[in-house]
Image: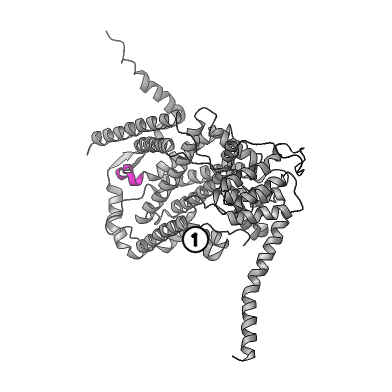
Amino acid sequence: MSGRVVVVAVIALALLVAPSALAHGEEEEALAAMPARTLVQQALGLLTQADDPLEAHERLEAALESEDRARVHIPAVRDAMRALGQGDHEGAIEHINQALAPAEDPAEPAEDPAEPAEEVPAEETLAHAEEFEPDRGTEEGIGVGVGAVLIAVGLGLLAIRRRTTPA
Amino acid sequence: MESGAAPARLGPRIWGWLDGRLGLSGLRYAVPEHANSLAYTLGGITAVSFVLLVVTGIYLAQFYDPANVAGAHASVFYISTEPFLGRLVRSLHYWLAVAFVVTLILHMVRAFATGAFKAPREFVWITGVLLFGLGGAALFTGTTLKADQEAIEALAHNNEIANFFGALGFWFSADFADNVSQILRIYIAHVTIVPILIVAVLAAHMLLIRKHGISPLPWGPAEEVEAREGSERQVSFSSHMRHIGLWGLVALGIGLILAGLFPPSLGPQGVEGIEVTKPPWWFIWLYEPENWFGLDALWIFSAVLFLGLLAVPFADRSPERDPRRRPFWVALGAAVVIAWLVLTIIGATTEVAQHVGM
C-alpha cells in the first residue's frame, strides 16, 4: 500500500471519528456547565424511568465537576456513584435522594461533608422516585358500579326507543 | 253544567310556560331518520364528552396548583390521594379525553367515507377539522399539566419548536412572560383559551349543520342520493338530542368503568434536560418521524395532516358520495388511517431517544 493511500485512510478515519469525539467533549463541557442539582435530578430520572445507569453515572460525575453545587449533598453523590459502580441501582437511588434532600431546607449548607444530610427513610425516597400508581379501592368500586348501571340504563332506553319507534 | 274545559296537566303547563319564553319547540325541527343511527351520533357523543370534560375539569381545578412545576406535580399527587373522589374524577377526566379523541376520529372517518363534506357542506367539514386541531391543543396542554417527566419533555418539545418559529412562536415559548411560570400559562390555555375556542367553533359547526341539514345516506348514484334526501322519513331534532344523550350516558358509563379499572399513572416530578419517556398514545404516531427527521417532523407532519384534511372538500369534488363510487379517495383515506396506525405501533415499540437539543 503506498504511503499516500495510508495518509488518506488515516485522514478519512480521523474525519470520521473526530466529530463524534469532539461532540462527546462538547457534551461533557455542556454537562459540567449545568447546576449540580439539575444533573443529579436528571440522573434520578435516568435511573428510575429509563434504567440507564451509564448515562446516570455520567450526570453524577458532571455534578461533581459542576461549579454550581448549591443544594446538593456532594458526599451522597459520591456514594451514589459507588453504588452504581457495584450495580446497586436501588442503593444509588437512595443516595441520590439523600443528595437532593437539602432542597427541603434551602438555608441548610448543602456542601459540608462534615454535616451529612438528614437521613431519609428508604421507602420514602423510593416512593418519590418511582412512578406513582394510584391505589384502587372504594372510589374505583363506585366508578365501576355506577358505570355499569349507566350503561345498562342507556342501552335499555335505547332499545325501548327502537322498539317503540313506528316503522 | 260543566264550566269549560278541564285544566291542562301540570307538565304540559310548565312546558307551555317555558316554551313561550325560551322557544324550546324550535328544537323540534325535522332531521332524517338515519341521524339516530350510531354512525351519525358519533359527533354528538364527542360533544357530550367535551361537556363532561368541562364538568370533571372544574372539579379538578379546585385542587390544582399551577404556580410552578413542583406545585403542579404535588397538587396532581394530592388530587390522586386526598379529595373526595379526586382519584376517580382525575381518572374519569383522562378516559373522557380518550373518548373525545376516539369518537372525534371515528366521526371524521364516517364523514369522509360518506362524503358528508361535499357541497354545500364544505364549511361543516372545515369547522370539524378546526375542532380536531383544537382537540389536539387541549390534549397537549392537558398532558403537560401533570408536570411529571412526560409533561416536562412535552414542554421541552413545545419550547424548541416555538423557538424555531422565532417571532411567530414567541407566544408559545417559555420566554414570553418572565414573571409567571410557563405551566401557569399552559393551564390558562387549557382551561379558558382552548375551551372557549372549541365552544365557538362547535357553535359554528352546529349552526352550519342546522342550515344545511344532516348529510344524506351515501348509497347509490349521486342523483339517487339527492332524490332520497328530500323523501326520507323524518324525526324531530329533540328526538335526536335524546338519542345522543342516551349514547352519552353509555359513554359516561364506559368511561367510569375504565376509570375504575385503569387509572392513569403519575410519574415522578419531571426534570429538564433528559428524554426518557414517550408521548401519550394520541401523539405517538409522531415519534418515529421525529426519529427519522428530528424535531421538525412534529410540526411538519402535523401541518401536512391538518392542511390535507382542510383540503379534502376542495380535492374530492365529484357529486358522488357513495364510497364505492369514489375508490381513489377512499383508498387514499384508508392509506392515511393505515399509515397512522403503523406509525403509532412503531412509535410505541421503538426505543426511547433524545430529540430536543439534537
- Quarter assignment of residue B325: bottom left
Magenta part of the protein: which range? B33-40
Q: In the image shown, does B345 or B106 lie closer to the viewer?
A: B345
- Screen quadrant of the N terminus of chain B: top left
- Left or right: where does residue A161 sit relative to residue B119? left
Q: Secondary structure at mark 1?
A: helix
* Residue at which label 1 appears: B288
Say whether residue B193 is magenta.
no
The residue under the point 49% across, 29% down is B85
Residue A42 shows in the view: no
**Residue that sits furthest to the left in the current view:** A167
Mark 1, other Cα within 10 Å: few <14 / some 14–19 / many ≥20: many
Residue B43 coordinates in the image, percent (x, y): 41, 45
**Vertical placement of B333 versus A69: above or below?**
below
Q: In the image shown, does B262 or B187 lie closer to the viewer?
A: B262
- Screen quadrant of the C terminus of chain B: bottom right
What's the colour scheme? Answer: one colour
The residue under the point 61% across, 83% down is A9
Q: Main secondary structure of the magenta part?
A: helix
- Left or right: where does residue A22 sit relative to residue B18? right
**Residue that sits furthest to the bottom in the current view:** A2
Q: In the image shown, does B111 or B292 lie closer to the viewer?
A: B292
**Vertical placement of B7 versus B76: above or below?**
above
Residue A33 coordinates in the image, percent (x, y): 73, 56
**Residue that sits furthest to the front in the current view:** A86
Residue A10 coordinates in the image, percent (x, y): 64, 82
Q: Disc 1 sits on a residue from what chain? A: B
**Vertical placement of B347 versus B208: above or below?**
below
Which amino acid does the dot numbered 1 rest on?
Glu
